[in-house]
Amino acid sequence: MKYTASSNPLEKTTSGCLVLGFFEKRTLATSAKKLDQALDGLLSDILARNRCSGKPGETLLLNYIPSGSAERILLVGMGRKGKVSARDYSKAVESATKNIRSSGASDSVFALAEIAVTDRSTTWKARQIVEISEDTSYRYTATKSDQPNAGHLSEIQLFVDKKSRVSDLKSGIRQGLAIANGMRLCKDLANLPGNLCTPTYLAEQAVELAEQFPTVSTRILDEEEMEQLGMGSLLSVSMGSRQPAKLIVMEYNKGPKNQQPCVLVGKGLTFDAGGISIKPAAAMDEMKYDMCGGASVFGVMSAVAELELPLNVVGIVPSSENLPDGSANKPGDIVTSMAGKTIEILNTDAEGRLILCDALTYAERYKPELVIDIATLTGACIIALGHQPSGLMGNDDTLCHELEEAGEMAGDKVWRLPIWDEYQDQLKSNFADIANIGGRPAGTITAACFLSRFTEKFRWAHLDIAGTAWRSGKAKGATGRPVPLLAQFLINRLEN
Ligand code: BES
Ligand code: MN
Ligand code: ZN
């Protein structure tokens, strides 16, 4: 899709569909009012007839316009005038993008950047339109014979009434496209089935990313190299699999030479059957999504490289399968991590933390400014927080606040859970330094407590994305989260 920005008068702009806002109590937004006058009150008449409420996302498609330069007009409810929240706005844009596609228009003009949104800039509004439009038009195609058609829409022009604001729209479009492209990469990798998306495949994709962006360099560590580094915990998880584990490292260094990098570590479990502590059959297919943390790291690296952010960012994706087999981990087995700590594996299904702990220790070599790990780590996170926010835990309040703020701004929210010392007791083992599970209470927190034992040397935050990385049921598919959150977090680091 092509996105452009303009302040040319709407009356003279031809389009397949012109999108205009209206508020509760049937008040038209500025541009809509102007057009209404030009059309002899047509818009206000139709609004009155249809008893529209103006609630965010309500739409009314006028499929025939007697005069003027727009073939169609889509009226979109924005909520209460002067009180439009970021969420109201996003809802309205989502509904507008879906409706235009079904209207049959091949190009569209959005006059929604003029709507005042509480605490949000023009750039943000442009970015939302691009991100949401790309998100709603995403179609998975990799393994389908019939290539689904996302509609005829091929261009969206963003309109703003002041010429001085056009550059704001343009920077929003640029950011929006980079984030949307990152989300698409994340979704494509995540939606691919486990037989195709193996650790080796993910490693190849990292090499491709480095080809696409010369500013990204990739290094792939194989099992032998991991063995030499002493990654006994990570390697134990892939023992039951015929697919060799990979440690994928992506580096992007466009920041100042002496600046310590932000390191992102993403869980890349390409299929999690649970191992010997095997999972029940129901919905087990969804465990192909157990590499969504890793996929989001790919997505963020892509967005950062596309935006050419002056930052140093390292992405690390430990990747493996977790399957039952004669040489798989058994409950009670004890392995030695790269950090030297011994781990008693009481449940082979708590494998995410086993691969992450060695990747986190590996991150130490970058002397990182901060480390964020992203993982579909615990089913308990869905019980605690549902599918709305990602779980956030960490050892640094400032970093956690920054992530909370970035999540609010990006519409990709997180909710923090405590990782008090009191919880650490649940990880005691009679036979090793630490056990890999802490029992049923506070499962999300004890998983983070496990990771916290390997992150004492740097500022660290952990995102549990078990509830947010994909949708189940009829709309089954990856969401691309938390790419928007992390991209926003990194962009904010430049502005502060
Ligand atoms: N990948 C799963 C977590 C998961 C489960 C995410 C379902 C989303 C939906 C993880 O490897 C796992 O199996 N965790 C166990 C931990 C338990 C054994 C302590 C879980 O959540 O049941
Ligand atoms: Mn598991
Ligand atoms: Zn898992």
Image: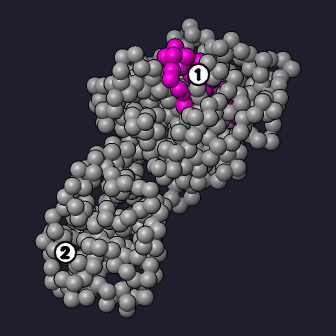
Residue 159, percent across and down? Answer: 24, 62
Three-letter amino acid code at disc 2?
Answer: Ala
343 over 387 or under it: above or below: above
- Residue identified by numbered label 2: 70
SS under mark 1: loop
- Residue identified by numbered label 1: 458
Residue in front for this viewpoint, 68 or 201: 68
Residue in front for this viewpoint, 256 or 265: 256
361 in the magenta segment: yes
Residue at 63% over, 23% down: 455
Most extreme residue toward the top, as rendered?
Answer: 228
Does residue 347 appear to the left or right of 385 in the view shown?
A: right
Q: Which residues are magenta?
A: 346-372
Does residue 192 appear to the left or right of 272 in the view shown?
A: left
Does residue 407 appear to the left or right of 209 in the view shown?
A: right
Pointer 1 local density, CA inside 10 Å: few below 14, some 14–19, many at least 20: some
Residue 328, percent across and down? Answer: 68, 24
Residue in front for this viewpoint, 415 or 188: 415
477 over 88 or under it: above or below: above
Residue at 61% over, 11% down: 230
How far apart are labels 1 and 2 at the CA level?
56 Å
Residue at 31% over, 62% down: 113
331 over 155 or under it: above or below: above
Most extreme residue toward the right, as rendered?
Answer: 430
Three-letter amino acid code at disc 1?
Answer: Phe
127 in the magenta segment: no
Residue at 31% over, 49% down: 172
Most extreme residue toward the left, as rendered?
Answer: 12
5 over 261 or under it: above or below: below
Say whether marks 1 and 2 touch (CB < 8 Å): no
Which picture quadrant has residue 101?
A: bottom left
Earlier sequence position, callout 1 versus callout 2: 2
